[in-house]
Amino acid sequence: MEQQHRQWQKQCGRFRYLTAQPMAPGVLSSTPPLPPDTTCGAPRSVTICAFGTVASTSSPTATTSLAVGNHGIRHSDTMLAVKHQELQPTHVRKSLSSFFVNPLASGDAATVPTSSGSSSSSSSTSQPRIFEQLALNTISLGSLSQLEAPETPDANLSIEVTTNDDYWPWDNDEEEEEDGGGKSARHSDATVNTTVITSEAWPPRQIITSAYRLPVLTMPKRWKHKIAYRRFRFHAASADIKMFSNLRKKSSSDLNLVFDMFRGPSPTDRVSASTGNLHRRRKKISWQAMSPNHIQKQLHLVQEEKAMQAAPSQPIDAAKFVAYVTERRKKRILFKGEYLMIQRSIDMQKCRSDVASTMDDRNAYPDTLPYDYNRVILHTMPGDENSHYINASYVNSWVREKAYVVTQAVKTKAANAEFWRMIWELGSNCIVMLTKVFDFMRVMCAQYWPITSAQFGEIEVETLETKTYAHFVIRTFRLKRLDEYKGLESRIVKHFHFTEWELDSFPYISAFIELRRRVRQHTEKCFADAPIVVHCSNGAGRSGAFIALDANLELLKKTGQIDVFGYAKTMVNSRPNLVDSVDQYQFIYDALAEAILCNVQPIAMHRLKDRSSMYKAKKDRQVMEVQDNHENKLLIMLTPTLRIGDCAGGHRLENRGKNRDVMVVPPDHARPYLQTLHGESKDYTYINAVEVDGFTRKGEFIVTEWPKAATVDSFWTLVFDHGCHTIVNLSNQGNEKQYPTFIHNKGKHTYGPFVVEILNYHQYPAITSHMVKIMKRTFMISEIMQSGSAQQQLEAEVRICCLIQVRMWPIENKVPLSTSGLIDMIKMARSWRKRAPDRPETKPTIVLSHNGVSRCGIFVAANVCIDQMDMDHEVDVFHAVKMIRINRPQLIDMKDEYKYLYDLMLHWYMTNPEYRAFDEREEEEKGLVENTSRPGSTRASVKSNKETRKNKVVYLN
């Protein structure tokens, strides 16, 4: 091979420069006149001009000839040319692997067709066939009108176009009118057309610029270095086979744009460069351009360009939106294409921040400044000429203008007073906060609200009520301001604080949708047409996600359509960075798709009869069965799938024996880690248990399986380390070999480093209860040294917990025989949590069954629904089940346990008279509202009376 390489070098001599040669118009010659070698005094390179749009659009089959002059090979005056008969897309793809042609291949020169259609052979048959395959891969189809004529006699392009009746696969998407003969206009009889393009002065880059960004291939000048030749062979034959096979599948238009590379300096630039530096620089550029990574980057840019053209041009119907999002999830680059189009839509003339750029002390984030045309302007305060400025922007919705005000987080005491002054001047009654106060060792936002009451400038803020949920907190504020003309004014403002959105992550979509539902539930009751104030840490991405969700759902409510792309362009022209990443943009799509799918609203407590199986005989059984099946399918479809990587801890070799079922393993981000050293396992932190969120607190429950003989110590370690005061056992197993006893009726028992003592034991018809004291044994080193043994110990860190076990639930039944026994268990567990020491309401409740899946879901979901009934006087079984299945997808059997939950909730409602009393008051108030048409009664007065009774608030207007 090396000998062939040396022979080839000797034959070619000074392998310098090769480009298209001059020809007379309309004539193709195999022996054109060659300029003297002195025309290229600087070191030259082999250059091929690849024209990407050289075939007529009216031809089913194209034969293209490219005349290439060869005046770099000194001993030959031969005109090399390339030709490809019956060019088809498959040929282009198959020949792609030969794009980097081995220069040592030898063979006959290609033939060149003349203007009359005949072809002439090369005068020499020993020249290397360097450009044959290369040209085949750079020729593509297009329109001759898109190819500008060269401007110099140094280049000619000869195109021979032959049309026939063959099917043309690249034009099958275009519809053309048929002529009188019944054939398409482009399927005419065979004809031959030859076109020669000539001009006066032409550098190759000009024609390439006019033909879409097509490639100029520059190959190294000499192959005298062995390492250079080997690197070339590596890239040509064995570089990233998978990537090249993917490229073969691309269309011809993609390939023309992908291979826009190998651009070197022009001849003029090369004259001024030194010879040595030129060699090194050209080699470096050539090898970098020929690398697979570079080609892959170029292909990715092409795909982005095509994805931008696929952006939607009109709103999408709600019936098609879920399918639209599902299809786009398969090709994530389509989301990126829309995102890039959104960024390009920013009107730089309109979106200027001249005023904000001069207020450095009032901007916590200099990269997020409000635009001048829509910024919020406050009243100027005496003595402060800049008090009119605050970093806040108006944003329109689809329904009305200035529907939202997006601002940054409060960081200083001065900004705190400005924030509340803005709330007062805007007349807003709703604040949405989408960041934590403290997140990952960073202060994201100051706590700008008081615990009880505080004065901020001229405004007094008083906290009336605080409701804490698992993923957000709802606060009610009363704002007071003394006006010299109006006297004392008072307003009520709701504050929705979303605590689920952590830094560099995305929240549960269900929780995000629920927050928006509660915000709209509040604003629809308010009659003031004031904007919703939304803020995160910098007033950018998270705020944009919320208002995009809200605005599109409002559009859906009005028109039945959704336009994420159109509204995103509105947002980025209203405030910088409201759509700050592709991930956030896709999150908006996912949230809207789930909101459309899960359009299951909470129901009033008195309507539980409509969903209970005990009353279905009196109702339309078929309709209720259809609704249950629909909800079951949605829950199965929306339940996340845990991968092995998500549950890596449970699949480790030392932990496999701690699992009863290898398919029921907790995810690492939601499993409780043990802290006390126990046992002989290498990983003493693992137990097959998972944290499940409740309605009012995250990680309110720990769901686990019946401990094995080797994990009983781990079970009591879990109880002690996590301070659990309540243990609910939903199984009553009799096989002690398979399900060993971990609790006794009396006495003390030692489990690893813990001593468990039974304080009392009670047995009821349906349940049993154990009062347990857990003591952790700790050794004193001084006592061990004195006694010479480890018998001396110190008992400390005592825990008191209550273990409640069900009795009337047969092993073979998926649900209990009745609801009474489980209702008693729930009441006892909730009662103990309220009166146990050490604030047990902040500690998790352990729920276990024989396999950690069956029965546990019923108890957890029932408690979630009961808390919802207590706080909001409504029930949402669907979303309760959906939430608890996030960390353990196997919870709740869709056939039996899901239906049983409605019966259980109805029983709970019927046994609590305070619920029925609340419903009666609601009916009375509803009747008052319906009778507002009577003289002397107004809707505003009824609402004022209702709010006064609820919050004990007196409006002083």
Image (cartoon, helix red, strand yellow):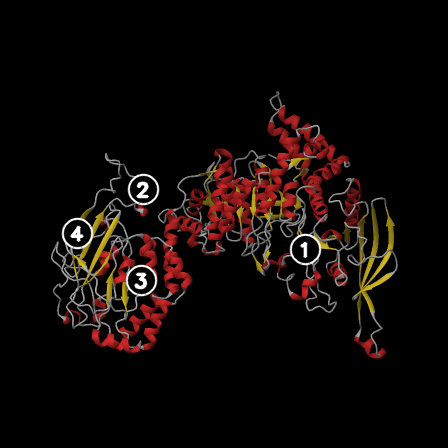
Q: Quadrant of the N terminus?
A: bottom left
Residue 195 left/right relative to 281: left
| Residue 459 visible in this rendered orientation of the protein | no
- 746 or 250, which is in the foreground? 250
Give the secondary structure at mark 3: loop
**What is the crowding at mark 1: few (fewer than 14 residues within 10 Å), some, or many (at least 20)?**
many
Q: Which mark is residue 690?
A: 1
**What is the crowding at mark 3: few (fewer than 14 residues within 10 Å), some, or many (at least 20)?**
many
In this figure, which residue is indicated by the disc labeled 4? 195
Using the numbered discs, state the Cα–Cα distance from disc 1 to disc 2 in whole angstroms: 57 Å
In this figure, which residue is indicated by the disc labeled 3? 261
In this figure, which residue is indicated by the disc labeled 2? 174
Give the secondary structure at mark 4: strand
Using the numbered discs, state the Cα–Cα distance from disc 4 to disc 1 in whole angstroms: 75 Å
In the image, what residue type sits under mark 3? Answer: Met
In the image, what residue type sits under mark 2? Answer: Glu
Query: Which of the marked residues, 4 or 1, is nearer the chain's N terminus?
Result: 4
Give the number of the mark in front: 1 or 2: 2
Give the number of the mark in front: 2 or 3: 2
Query: Which of the marked residues, 4 or 3, is nearer the chain's N terminus?
Result: 4
